[in-house]
Image (cartoon, rainbow, N blue to C red):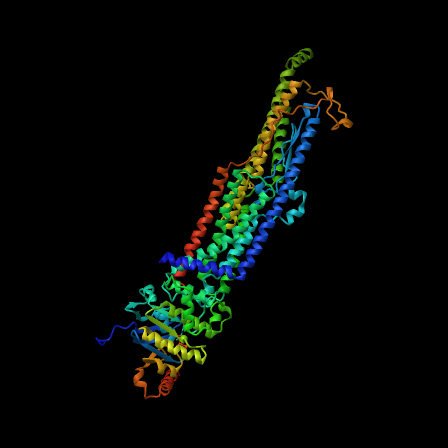
Amino acid sequence: MNATQPAPMLEARGLVKRYEDGVLALDLVSFAVRAGEIYAMLGANGAGKTTTINIFLNFVEPTEGEALVDGIVTHKDPLAAKERLAYVSENVMLYPNFTAIQNLEFFARLAGKTEVTRDECRDVLRRVGLQDDAHAKRLKGFSKGMRQKCGIAIAILKDAPAILLDEPTSGLDPKAGFEFLNLLAILRSEGKAILMSTHDIFRAKEIADTVGIMSAGRLALQRPASELAGQDLEQLYLQHMAGHVERAA
Amino acid sequence: MITNMIGVIIRKELRAALVSPKFVASFGVCALLMLLSTFVGIREFQASREQYEAAQRLNEQEMREQTAWGRLGTRVFRAPDPLQIFASGLQNDIGRWSSVDAFNPVKLKNSVYSDDPVFAVFRFIDLAFIVQIVLTLMALVYTYDAVNGERESGTLQLTFANPVPRHVYILGKAVGAWLALIVPLFVPLLMSLGLLSVFDILLSAEHWLRIAIMMGASLALVSVFIMSGVLVSALTSRSSVSFLVCLVGWVVTALLIPRAGMMTAGYLVAVPTAAETDSRLDGFSKERWNVHMKELGERWRARNEQLTGKTEEERRAEREAKEWDWMEEDDRSRKQVQRDIDEYATRLREDVRNRKLEQERLGFTLARFSPVAAFQLALMNLAGTDMGMKARFEDALTEYRKTFNTYRDAKVKESGTFGGIRISFDSQRGMKIEQGREETLDLAEMPRFSDPRVPLRDAFSAALVDIGLLVGAALLACAAAVAAFLRYDVR
Ligand SMILES: Nc1ncnc2c1ncn2[C@@H]1O[C@H](COP(=O)(O)OP(=O)(O)OP(=O)(O)O)[C@@H](O)[C@H]1O
Ligand SMILES: [Mg+2]
C-alpha cells in the first residue's frame, strides 16, 4: 500500500462467498475505495456485484476474506460499520402508506439523525430531482424512478462517509440519470467513498475513478478510469464477458 | 441512543397502523361488536333482574298468604349479577331457582338455556367471547407479517442498512404492534364500560375491581397473540406461510386444545353416570334389605325356639312381655339398614363429586395449554360464573334450607298449630288482608337467602394462576421472537 495515500474507506480483502446451495458467487475479490473516490463495478447479471455490496452491509457473511468499512470488519462489528455506510438498492422499496417526507424522516432517524427537519427533507428531495408536489404524497403512487430518487435522498440525508449504490440509476429517466451523475460528483467532492455497481458502461467511464469488471465472481479487470481514457471500455467489457461465457460453458 | 431507536420504530409502527385501511376497518368492526355485545348484555341483565324481582315479590306474597306454618315453603331465586354481562360463563346453564321446604332436597331448576333453547344455539356473545375469538384473531391478522412483510416489501433491507441492533428492532416492532392494537381495542372496551352508567347499572367498588382485573386478563391474552404473531413472522420468510401458520395455530389454541383437554380428561378419569350410581345404590339397598329380611326371619325363628316346650299360657305371657323389646329391636335394625343405605348414597354422591372434580382439574390443566382456555377460566372465576357456581349455589341452598326449616319448626311450636289444617278461602286471597283466623303469616323474621359470592381475594387468587400463565406466555413469545430474529435473513 502506498504510504502517502489515505487508508481506504471501503475495502474488500479476498472475499469468497459460496451460498448454501453451493453457488460460488464471489471468488477472491479484493479492491479498495478511498475517500473522495468513485469505484464502478461492472459485470453481467449474476456476476456477484450485489453479493459484494451485501457483504459490506453484513446482509450476508463472507465464506472467506473480509470486507472493511473505515477499517472495521463488517461481519465482526456490523453496527459500527453501518454507521459509516449509506445504501441505495437496485430497487428502492419504502413504506407505501407514508409520504416521501415521512419515509425520509423515518430512515434519517434510524440513521441517527434524530433532529432532521421537514425542510431538510424537502431540500434533499429537490436535490435528487423529485418535484415538489410529490414530497407530501404517499409512496404508493410513485414510479420506480421516483422511488429510486427517494432512496438516493435517504442515502444523502444519512451523510455517511461511505456510500454503496447497487445500480442506483436503474429506472431513472435520462435527465434524472444525468443529474444523478452530477450529484455523485458533488458527493465525491465532499469526500465520500462511493462503491457503485452498474450496467451503464459509458457513465461508469465518465464518472468513476476506478472501474472494476466482475465476471463469474472474479474481479476480471480493475483499472483507474484515467488509464481507460483512450481505450474502448465497451470492447474490454465484452471481452471479459466472453471469458465469462466461456468459463461458464 | 438505543431507547431513541426503539422510540423511532415504535412511532413508525403506530403511524403505519393509523394510516392502514386494514386497521381502520378492523377497529371499527371490533368497536361495533363490543358495544353491541355490551348493549345486549345489559338489556338481558336488566330483563333478568326485573324477572328476578317480580318472581321474588310474587313468592313473598304467596308466602304471606299461606296460613299454616307447618307447611310453609319458599322459593329461592338466583339474583342476576352485572358481571354476567361481560363473562356469562355458566350463568345461563344453571337453573335459576329452587324450592325450599321440609320435604324435597334443593334443586336448581329452569336455566335460561333450558327455558329458551334458542339462546343455547345462538349463545349470547359476551365480551369474554369477543376477546377470546375476535380480538385474538385480530391480533394475529395484525402481526402475522410484522417482520416478513417488511422483508417482502423490501423495507427491511433499507432498515438494516442502518446501525439498528436486531433485538432493538424486533422489540420496537413488538411493542409498536402491541400499542397499535391495544390502545384501539381498549378504547371500545372502555366505552362499553361507559354504557353501564348510561343504563344505570350500579356497580360496587368490588365489581369495578373485578372488572379491572378482567381487563388486565384480556390485555394479557391479546398480548400473547400479538407476540405470537410477531414470533411467527420472525420465523418465516414469506407472509403467506406465516398467515397459514397463524391461522392453524389459532384454530388449535382457541378451538381445539380446550376441547381436547376436557375430552382427554373425560377418558382418563371416568365419572359414573347418574344411571350407574342409581343402579349401584339400588343393588346395594336390595342386598341390604334382603339380608335384613333374612336376619329378621332368623330372629323370629330363634324367638319361637325359645318358646318351644312351654305351655300356651306361658308362651302368650312371655310374648306379651317381650313383644315391645322385639319390636324395638326390629325397628333398630331396620333403621340401621336405612342409615347404611343413606350413608352409602352419600358416599356414592361424594365419590361422583370427587371424580368430577378430579376430571375437571385434569381437564383444566390440559386445557390451560391454550391461553384462550386459561383466559376463560380466569374470567369465569372473576365473574363468579365458574364451574363451581352450581355446587356453590346448591351448598348455600342446602344450608339455607336448614336455617329455614329450623325457623319454620320454631314458628310451628310458637303458634301451636302443628297439624292443624286450616281452610283458606281462595276467593278472598290477595284481595285484602284478613284479620282473625285467616291471619297471614308474619314473615318479618324469616331468614333470607343471600347469594354465595366467592370473596374477591379467593376469586383473584384462583384467577391469578391463569393470568400469570398468560403474562408468562406473552413474555416467552416475545423472547422467542427476539431470539428468532437474531438469525433472520433480512434480504
Ligand atoms: N441468496 C442466494 N442464494 C444462492 N445463490 C445466490 C443468492 N444470491 C445470489 N446468488 C447467486 O450468486 C451469484 C451472484 O449474484 P449477484 O446477485 O451478486 O449478482 P449481480 O452481479 O448483482 O447480478 P445482477 O446484475 O443481476 O444484479 C448468482 O449466480 C446468483 O444466482
Ligand atoms: Mg445485483
- In the rendered image, is residue A148 in sight? yes
Furthest toward the left, the residue is: A3
Front residue of B54 and A218: B54
Q: Quadrant of ligand 1?
A: bottom left
* Residue in front for this viewpoint, B98 or B205: B205
**Which image quadrant: the N terminus of chain B?**
bottom left
Q: Position of residue B321 (x, y in %)?
A: 64, 12
Q: Is residue B203 left or right of residue B55?
A: left
| Vertical position of residue A192 compared to residue B316: above or below | below
Q: Is residue B315 left or right of residue A136?
A: right
Tell me where residue B10 appears, x and y as whole percent: 43, 58
Does the rendering let one see residue A23?
A: no
Q: Quadrant of the C terminus of chain B?
A: bottom left
Up the image or down, A171 lies above or below B236; here it is below
Give the x, y percent position of residue A103.
44, 66
**Taking B274 as reference, is B293 above or below it?**
above
**Number of callouts in the render?**
0
Q: Estimate the x, y position of residue A106 in percent, counting from the top left.
A: 42, 63
Q: Quarter-wise, where is residue B59 in the image?
A: top right
Front position in the image: A82 or A126 = A126
